[in-house]
Amino acid sequence: MISQKWAKLLRSLQQKKYRKIEQLFVVEGEKAVLEVLQSDWSVKALFATEDFLQRHAALAQKAAMVQQASPTELAQVGSFQSNDAALAAVEIPAQLDYQEQAVDWVLVLDQINDPGNLGAMIRIADWYGIKTILCSSDTVDLYNPKVIAAAKGSFLRVQLHYGDLNHWLGQTGLPVYGAYLEGENIHQLALQQQGGYLVMGNEANGISPALAQLVSRKLTIPAFGQTESLNVAMATAVLVDNLKRLSAVRS
Amino acid sequence: MISQKWAKLLRSLQQKKYRKIEQLFVVEGEKAVLEVLQSDWSVKALFATEDFLQRHAALAQKAAMVQQASPTELAQVGSFQSNDAALAAVEIPAQLDYQEQAVDWVLVLDQINDPGNLGAMIRIADWYGIKTILCSSDTVDLYNPKVIAAAKGSFLRVQLHYGDLNHWLGQTGLPVYGAYLEGENIHQLALQQQGGYLVMGNEANGISPALAQLVSRKLTIPAFGQTESLNVAMATAVLVDNLKRLSAVRS
């Protein structure tokens, strides 16, 4: 049974304002909750069905508090349409300072608004072994339940830093690549060095003018058809895939 | 003012059953509606704001019927959260027989369930100039409003055929590539010929066993991190990008 107090708190965490006050966010669904419990993130409260708690008795003990709940109760406090096994309230970790590493690839997100897009981009970063994403302060919040749902467990393995992109990119000596509709064809590119930044712009407006001045190389996915644009998460997948392919050729 | 009769009909078109009975589907939002009006698809009814109708007077005449409506009315009959300019009821065209073309690339979708994924894959096909998608009969309906929304105008330029994939692929002489987690590394692939089929499997279960027997070459996107899988639409974008890159190298 989920207490009234917790039900109210959990629902409030769908809003950024309350996530900030409570320093908590919600992870839903059996698979994602299991991944959080297996990680070193701090689970303040776990709400799960009797069945889940029996099957994962040892892992469940990693939560500071455990309450058994029915699928109906879980659905009522969550934002998923079908969340019938488990839900966790997890502590938001302190944001670490960003430290540049010479040979890494870093994804840079300039005002990404759509939570599904951010979640997908975190998953792409994780697939390609990119450990760091720099986000403009106005990029959608990582702890938005839709971002967490779309990112699957990948948010546990990729570090996101929110802050002033112009500041971070203004002082690097690494190449800064940017996604544009008219740049160098990514299929014919050669890389002079391993690692660098890949900047992806806002869904409607692209990369902001101030940041664009810091882009040293404009990249383009060749179009073979008539549509005007690819979704920004799709474009990220394709660009990162090409950069990783080219890096492997070099190394 | 949208009549009661039309309001009821438009809302019913969110369900496949009624789309089949009426042979109509709904396109929402200014940009998509303009693309439909510019195409040779048959618009049975256009509902739009006074402003939209003034700005696009000539195009609006291509609809068999036009009714002026307020943004509130449009939002009430549509499925979008913000659809404040136009909505069209469009006739579902007859499905053409699929005819294989020797050098084309064809995307093959085996039981794709998520409308957002199908929409994204149509958009990817359009970007890369793939004109044909073969869908298993149990793939989500093209005319589902979420598919149409995610596909943007690309559904106007890509032909989808629903039917028996085993039948179509059982009689081809072209290569049949399939997306797998353990296959040939797409970054190190060489193609013997231009064109062929790329099979993408269901979100949870992959390519079905019967169809898998028709796959001549298993392809894999190399993973550099720890996540188990990429979203199927992302994987499609990356695989198609690589196949088109390799085709260009050949030609």
Image: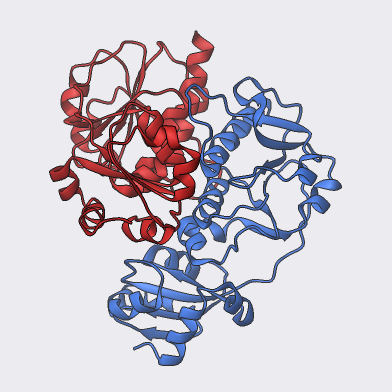
Chain colours: A red, B blue
Of residues B216 and B65, which is closer to you in this image? B216
Residue found at x 56% / y 61%: B156
Residue that protrudes farthest toward the left in the picture: A21
Q: Vertically, is A160 above or below B61?
A: above
Could one spot residue A122 in this view of the protein?
no
Q: Is residue A84 left or right of residue B23?
A: left
Residue found at x 47% / y 45%: A52
From the top left corner, tell me how far across and down residue B80 is, in percent: 38, 67
Q: How many marks?
A: 0
Could one spot residue A60 in this view of the protein?
yes
Q: Is residue A205 left or right of residue B138?
A: left
Quadrant containing the N terminus of chain A in the rendered view? bottom left
From the top left corner, tell me how far across and down residue A186 is, in percent: 47, 27
Q: Vertically, is A101 above or below B211?
A: above
Residue that protrudes farthest toward the top in the picture: A251
Residue that protrudes farthest toward the bottom in the picture: B4
Q: Is residue A232 left or right of residue A108?
A: right
Residue found at x 25% / y 34%: A135
From the top left corner, tell me how far across and down residue B83 is, in percent: 34, 69
Of residues B111 and B173, which is closer to you in this image? B111
Residue found at x 45% / y 57%: A82
Of residues A177 and B200, which is closer to you in this image? B200
